[in-house]
Image (cartoon, helix red, strand yellow):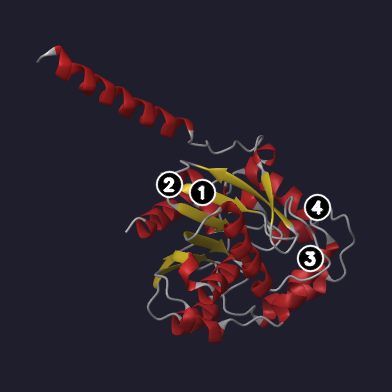
Amino acid sequence: MPNALRRPLTLFALMQIGTLVAAYAEEVPIPSQDDWSDAKQSVTLRNGISLSYVEMGPAEGQPTLLLHGYTDNSRSWSLLAPHLGDRRLIAVDLRGHGDSATPACCYGIDTLANDVDGFMDALGVKAADVVGHSLGSMTAATLAAYYPDRVDRLVLISTAAAAPAEAADWLWENVSTMEHPIDPDSEFMMNWYWNPTPVDDDFLSRERAESAQTSETTWMGVLRALTFTDWTKMAPHIEAPTLILWGDQDSLFGSDSQVQIQHILPQAKHVTYEGHGHNMFWEVPDKVGQDVADFLDR
């Protein structure tokens, strides 16, 4: 081949290598348990409150928002994240949780969904796949109903349309009488983080300790809001393909809750994890991660 033709090809090859190197350099690794808190960033929303978050994976990957449960924080996703493939994972601390701001009001799922909408604006994310757990799943469902153009695919882990009476009564009996700061090793906190099968102890002890630091404002704000929460009538407005994951040993959202969910979201795909509980994505993150990744990558 003449030298004149070799030079453009060589230049093109170098450009391709440079692009690959740049893309690789922009991939953010998943923080270790030790490094999780230091990996948090913060952004101020249009409503003036600040939310903290941890971003992982390739910058050009499909944006995937991860919304945690009641008194958890972004660390909640640290065990699942390695099993979700090459995605731009953005794990949010909801208001009042983790390192995010704790305003005096308000903690209903409509407000939390509005926060997430503002968070997406702040990060320049037009649309994303959204994965939510428990309170985060209710928030994700509300986001998908209120702002359907925001949600490409929806995954609801351990969800319910409304808090069952038994669970609500147990929470009111305990949360409304707790003294703060809470002892992370107290009977209530051990029960709050109970799992029917083993969970990585290093992760779980950190998650429980951070939950115990959650303010009384958040504990009570969410509880009061959940008492009146029922997103049944919003369900028909959810357009995104939806996956629902549930462990049959869920001590908060039992089988009756799942019957109701199947009724209001009849087109959704349902997966049950036998022998696992409310936090099954901590118990078997590899299995749950595979199911979530397969669904999101369709």
Quadrant housing the C terminus: bottom left
| Mark 4 and mark 2 residues within 8 Å of each other at the beta carbon | no
Work out whether mark 1 precedes mark 2 in sequence or the reverse, and give the earlier one.
2
Tell which circle, 4 or 2, labels the residue nearer the N-terminal end.
2
Q: CA distance from mark 1 to mark 4?
A: 25 Å
- What residue does disc 1 label? 89
Q: Name which residue type carries label 3.
A: Trp
Give the amino acid type for the residue marked by disc 2 in the picture. Gly
Of marks 4 and 2, the one in the foreground: 2
Closer mark to the observer between disc 1 and disc 4: 1
In the rendered structure, which disc, 3 or 2, sits on the residue that comes first in sequence? Answer: 2
Q: Amino acid at mark 1?
A: Leu
Q: Residue furthest front?
A: 4
Q: Which residue in the protein does label 4 denote?
A: 213
Mark 3 neighbour class, 10 Å CA radius: few under 14, some 14 to 19, many 20 or more = many
Location of residue 141 in the rendering, given as x and y in whole percent from the top left corner: 54, 72
Q: Position of residue 59 (x, y in %)?
A: 48, 42
CA separation, marks 1 and 2? 8 Å
Q: Return the mark for residue 31.
A: none
User: Where's the N terminus, which quadrant?
Assistant: top left
Question: Distance between the Cα atoms at labels 4 and 3?
Answer: 10 Å
Amino acid type assigned to the residue bearing label 4 in the image: Gln
Specify few, some or many for label 4: CA neighbours under 10 Å numbering under 14, 14-19, or 20 or more.
some
Residue at screen point 52% across, 76% down: 145
Element marked by disc 3: helix
Observer able to see residue 280: yes
For label 3, the residue is 219
Q: Which residue reaches farthest right?
A: 179
- Label 3 to label 2: alpha-carbon separation: 34 Å
